[in-house]
Amino acid sequence: MPKTFDAIIIGSGQAGPSLAVRLAQAGMKTALIEREHLGGTCVNDGCIPTKTLVASARVAHLAHRAAEYGVLTGGEVTVDMKTVKERKDRIVQASLDSLASWIGGTENLTLIWGVARFTDAHTVEVGGESLTAPRIFINTGGRPTVPDWPGLSEVPFLTNTSMMALDTLPDHLIVAGGSYIGLEFAQMYRRFGSRVTVVEYADRLIAREDPEVSDTVREILEAEGIAIHLHARGIAVERRGQGVRMTATVGDNSVTIDGSHLLLAVGRLPNTGDLNLEAAGVRTDGRGYIQVDDTLRTSADGIWAMGDVNGRGAFTHTSYNDFEIVAANLLDDDKRRVSDRITAYALFTDPPLGRVGMTEAEVRASGRPALKGVLPMTRVGRAKERGETLGFMKVLVDRETHLILGAALLCIEGDEIVHSLLDIMAAKAPYTVIQRSVHIHPTVSELIPTLLGSLKPLE
């Protein structure tokens, strides 16, 4: 006989544990199934560890610039990668310990280790044991894409996951992929002291962004000594001594790159292959992402999908919001929807990119009359005081309603100050609310009203 529960959650990423605890606290007998480690990508090899490494890389970068600020370090700046990794590991472990304690201390909640596989719409099998529940929630996340390049199976390569185990400094890191994950690692390891080359299939970096964002990010990275090859085709790799050789066609030229390490950052895939979703009647799209409605219900009654696996957002904050949407509808009689949220994310290079709402290309494609404001960071007092004047701020506004449509803040603290615009957008308030507010001087945020005061018709 199968073990009976009121609810089963498969996967312990950002949505799973929070929902499991809410359901258990509501009196439901709940099972949380995890195949490998608690916390999912964010805690183990995503947000927490990478941003910890970014912090170490930024300190190294500032140490190299210390003389510009009148600070003399008294010698050569060096980076101890073992200590860098040890610091990262301590911070990750503290998060894991806290999560394990929270789950273990919750009544009505059972943590089960193993790989879950559906046998029907209300039953999963884990380690030869059957579990059944009227409500099942899938939170299995994603994994790095491994391309089918010639020779790749014969050479050692890294992904954002295996990169977390590295405690030595690559002599020359080849980063395959010029988007968010790849660029963060590229700048990070360049600042640690590696030679870094980025190879990207598209004709510009972070191709989903507006061209001026892509171009400025490229200029910033190249100024730090990172080599960048765009529009790469015919990529092949082979072992070269202890390292790897990559060949590609870039434009009309053949390019050969010899590196000590190869990092693959060319996209991600959903973890749906082991679930046997067909047995449960759960439909997926052509890429394997689980199809869900506006409340995250799948095609099978009584089954929901949250987080990266549903293709409705690839961020920790969207995954956690998925939990909030499911919990609100199930437990709080609060009709929250995925379509209610505003697109917002960041690229954690230095300076970071804070993005919210529509890009300029999307605004133009919509055909609506709009206003645009742009402010270079060379006009921002706080940026000049800090010696960090790279980048710009851009905002787009509906000309008729005065509602903010989107913004790109590629600047010092852009990942923080973007929330001032996000909150106004969520409140559906006109841009004049923030334009007329009095901000504190000297800060970066105080220039948001100035930015909004520079609006001109989008031609």
Image (cartoon, rainbow, N blue to C red):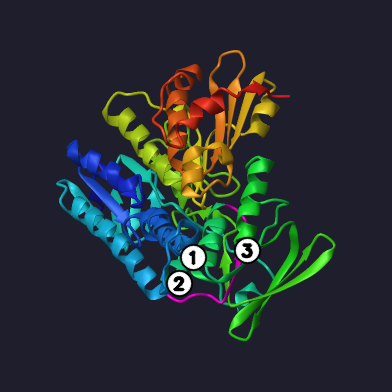
Q: Which residue is mark 2?
A: 77
Q: Position of residue 269 (x, y in %)?
A: 53, 54
Which range is magenta? 167-179
| Residue 327 seen | yes
Which residue shows up at 65% across the image and 83% down it? 240
Which residue shows up at 60% across the image and 58% down it? 266
Which residue shows up at 37% across the image and 60% down it? 44
Q: Count residues near mark 1 (Cα–Cα under 10 Å), then give few for <14, some for 14-19, many for 20+.
A: some
Residue type indicated by callout 2: Val
Q: From the viewer's side, name the closer residue of 115 and 356.
A: 356
Left or right: 183 in relation to 62: right
Q: Secondary structure at mark 1?
A: helix
Which residue shows up at 42% across the image and 71% down it? 165
Mark nearer the N terminus (3 vs 2): 2
State the predominant SS element of the stretch in magenta: loop
Mark nearer the N terminus (3 vs 1): 1
Q: Are marks 3 and 1 in contact (CB under 8 Å)?
A: no
Q: Position of residue 111 (x, y in %)?
A: 24, 55
Q: Secondary structure at mark 3?
A: loop
Residue type indicated by callout 3: Ile
Q: Position of residue 447 (x, y in %)?
A: 50, 31
The answer to whether 89 is drawn above or below residue 336 in the figure is below
Q: Are marks 2 and 1 in contact (CB under 8 Å)?
A: yes
Q: Is residue 375 magenta?
A: no
Compute the Cα span from label 3 to label 1. 16 Å
The image's mark for residue 226 is 3
Q: Is residue 176 magenta?
A: yes
The image's mark for residue 83 is none
The answer to whether 79 is drawn above or below residue 107 in the figure is below
